[in-house]
Structures are given as C-alpha cells and as structure tokens.
Image (cartoon, helix red, strand yellow):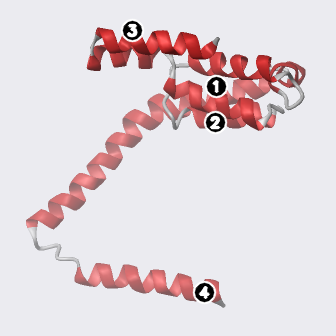
Amino acid sequence: MNRELKILAAMVAVFVVAWTLPLGNPDVSNAILEAFKLLQWYVRHHTLACVVPAIFIAGAITTFLSQAAVMKHLGPRSPKRVAYPVAAVSGSILAVCSCSVLPMFAGIYRLGAGLGPATAFLYAGPAINVLAIFLTARVLGFDIGLARAACQEKAEK
C-alpha cells in the first residue's frame, strides 16, 4: 500500500507542476527549451562518443579476456602488491571519463576481479590517464601538469 501512495503522490506532484507552470512567461519557456537542447547535445555527443564505445570495450573485456588471467592478476587471492598496480596501470592506459569507465569496471568485476583492484581500476581510469595529465598541463600550466605526471609515476610504483 505504501508503494501505491508514493506513486499517487508523484502523479499529483507532476499534475500540480503542469497546472501551475507559467508557460506563457518567455523565461520559463526558454529555460525548458534550453534544457531539452542540452539533453539533445548530451545524447548526440557524449553518449555516442563515450558511453557506447565503453560498452563495446566492456563487452570485449568479458569476451576476450580470460577469467583465469583476471583471477591471477586481479582476483581476491592475488597478491596486493601485484593486483593494485596492475589495476591502476590498466585504468590509466584508458583515456576515459568517469561514466565511461563504469561498464569496464563491471566487466572486470564480473570476470572475478577483487573489489579493491576493480575499484583501483575504476578510479585510475578518469583520474590518472595520459589525456588527463595533458589536459591539466594545458589548462593549469606546464609546471602543474609535470608535477601531476611525476606524482602519478611515484604513486604507481
């Protein structure tokens, strides 16, 4: 019964918003139009350019990567001094954003990687990849980019 009340409350809320929304106001109409334009841009550029290839890469990981190799290097019983650096280097090789690395994380986790190494892969992908270092150097200056690269090198050892 509680679930039905929540659904009813959501439907009433949508109805009240639709009833009271001042669509005659040009600012409100423009804001709604711009929100849909932003959604369209996101779907056209980000989803097709990042998320769809990431799903294919995740499928390739689960198809072509043997479970024995994943268990040997990233599994819960593999030595931590091997598993974490392998996961971090594997993640840093891929120049992916935080939403694109999620399907790949799921792929190696399903193959049997331990939660710790899989999480290291998840964080290393967007945080310490080569593209992020060059972007840091371009936006914040060469010295900061060089420092980030040096700190990444020390962190991976």
152 on left or right of 141: right
Residue 103's disc is 2
In space, the residues marked 1 and 3 are separated at their CA atoms by: 30 Å
Residue at 51% in and 18% down: 129
Q: Residue at 57% of width from left, 18% of height from top?
A: 92
- Give amino acid for label 1: Ile
The amino acid sitting under disc 2 is Pro
Position of 102 relative to 27 (above/below): above
- Give the labeled residue for mark 4: 4
Q: Cα distance, mark 4 to mark 1? A: 40 Å
> Residue 76: image x %, image y %?
85, 32
First-in-chain label (2 vs 1): 1
Question: Which amino acid type is shown beneath numbered disc 4?
Answer: Glu
Q: Residue at x 64, y 21 (%)?
A: 88
Mark 1 neighbour class, 10 Å CA radius: few under 14, some 14 to 19, many 20 or more: some
The percent position of residue 15, horizontal first and vertical second, equals 36, 83
Location of mark 3 (residue): 146
Whole-number angstrom distance, CA of label 2 to CA of label 1: 8 Å
Q: CA distance from mark 2 to mark 3?
A: 30 Å
Label 4 element class: helix
Question: Which residue, given by chain and number where applicable, does mark 1 sit on?
Answer: 57
Q: Which structural element holds mark 2? A: helix
N-terminal-most mark, 3 or 4: 4
Mark 3 vs mark 4, foreground winner is 3
